[in-house]
Image (cartoon, rainbow, N blue to C red):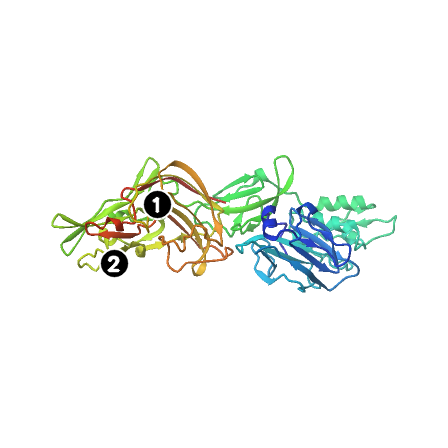
Amino acid sequence: MFTRTTKFLRWNMAAFFACAACLWVGCSESSEKPLFPEDEISEEMELKLSGWKVDSLDTDAKVVYVKPAKGWLDSLVIDSLALPGSSSLYLAADDDLVDPALGEKLVPGTVISTKDTNQFSIVALDSYNRIAGVWLVVWKLPETPKSSDSKVASSGDAKSSSSETADSAGSSETGSSLDSSAGTSSGSSSDSSSGESGTSGGSSESAGGESSSSEENDSSSSEAAQPQAVKLPDLNVDGGTVTVEGSKVYVEMPYGSDLSSIQLIPLDTTNNLIRPVEMEFEDADGNVGTYSVVAGVQLPGSDFSARNDFWATTSDAMATKKSSAAITVSSSANLEFNGGMATITTREVEGSFLFIDGSWKMAGGFYFSGEYTGQTALDIYEQGSDGGTPSTGDSYIAKDMTFGKPFTARPTAFEIKYSYNHVANSSANYPQKSLVYVMLVGENGKVVATGALSDNANAGMAERTVQLSYGADPFGLLSGGYAIADGLTLGTGDEDVISIHVMFASSAYAHVVAGGTAGNSGKYRGGENSSLTLDDFKLIY
């Protein structure tokens, strides 16, 4: 069923327990056995498999090995299931152990055939319907003479071993063989003629053609057949960098790279590294371990050392005077680069007749991933002006903003170094505050993940990290009246990402340019000369 090597999604055990409390697998007899130690088990969840019992388990790789309690059974039935809180379990509808499609919900009475496969996946969703983890349940298919078709779930093709071919369905040797296979990183199978048992004094041939007269030699031969893991210090990638942090291997590529087809050198295969993939590597001390490998990119110009076309701004329009019906509308640029930093500022836009000021509105400073089509201060003062007498009504300049740039990665957080200068306004409904947000967006306007921060008081230069929430909008970006794309709706968090929306705003609400004639400053949605200074922005994976 699976052809990949041991590439299991390593996910935080605490997240799994929070999502699924505790998982039990056993049979309906008295030999039922818990998957986790009893001190980690609550009575909130229980899953039992009729007629089957646990042979062994690998909690690191999230693999459970089961076998029939008695004779071979053509199906496996879910006897009982209790789920905690709002989390839920599903059968996987495909063989993807990183981002599986959801099949039917796991409920009592669910029947799983054991005829044509030797495994199934359980997908655990958390309270936000995000995938919290994937567990694999594996059994060994009945032996057939000289057959190499039996698959071990976590290693792609089965490894040969004298303990696998021995006729001992309930023996501990069988469990050990399965468990050790889960730790291999090979993607190819090795046929073993040692599966044919000879007499007690006879010998059997190994895969390499060498004879062996003992089970110990057979085992050594099997271990020798397994390829060596690639050494971590040897990993590199063309055009990018490889960084190892604990059990994570982070591959950073230039913006615009195809993260779905990354070849790590010296590996001879390409991998889709948009989502984490589990691989085995050998560290500098010779220890082989499982690492979570993921690729990502940084956004162009995110060090703010200079203006970059990845980002759009309203500043150019602010600085361009425009006359309409004898009224001249003007302001000044509100984006400045200086000393490796960018500052965006909230400023007034004025309308004057024959050098007599008669109208004022307040516009925020915006620097965002996307495009802005406004060209003059009149477009700021009155979005969509037809060239007639400028209106004193609100101007919704977000209508001239196109949000988002192409993006496929799945960062977990963003890091921003900034300072904020606060100048209060008098609007009770739209108080002055800054805004920084990131939204990952999929097809059909589905928002995959959100993260945001805002300050309503002075903030000195500091670095902050904001976690991205997949399938959730805790800040209320979609409903808070901020400058965002039209037609966005919150997704499950499991969708593929196709674009990234990033916004830096000196005034969170002043994309609606409001005010009018003298005495209407209470309508201002931003505080004049409030400013946001940006020093560095980084996506975390």
Q: CA distance from mark 2 to mark 1?
A: 26 Å
Question: In the image, what residue occupies the spot 39% across and 45% down?
Answer: 454
Sequence-earlier tag: 2 or 1:
2
Residue type at tag 2: Gly
Q: Position of residue 245 (x, y in %)?
A: 55, 39
Looking at the image, can residue 47 be seen?
A: yes
Residue type (three-letter) at the residue carrying disc 1: Lys
* In-front residue for pair 514/132: 514
In the rendered structure, the answer to whether residue 422 lies left or right of residue 467 reads left
**Which residue, given by chain and number where applicable, does mark 2 sit on?**
384
Percent coordinates x, y for residue 152 in the rendering: 69, 54
Q: Relative to the observer, which residue lies in front, 489 or 294?
A: 489
Q: Which residue is mark 1?
A: 433
Residue 18 against residue 336 in the figure, above or below: below
Say which of marks 2 and 1 sits in front.
Answer: 1
Q: The N terminus appears in which quarter of the rendering?
A: bottom right
Other-residue count near label 1 (Cα within 10 Å), few / some / many at <14 / 14–19 / ≥20 = many
Q: What secondary structure is found at the residue carrying circle 2?
A: loop
Mark 2 near mark 1, Cβ–Cβ under 8 Å? no
Expressed as whole percent of the image width and height from the top left, the position of residue 516 reads 21, 52
Whole-percent x and y of residue 83?
62, 57
* Residue 207 visible in this rendered orientation of the protein: no
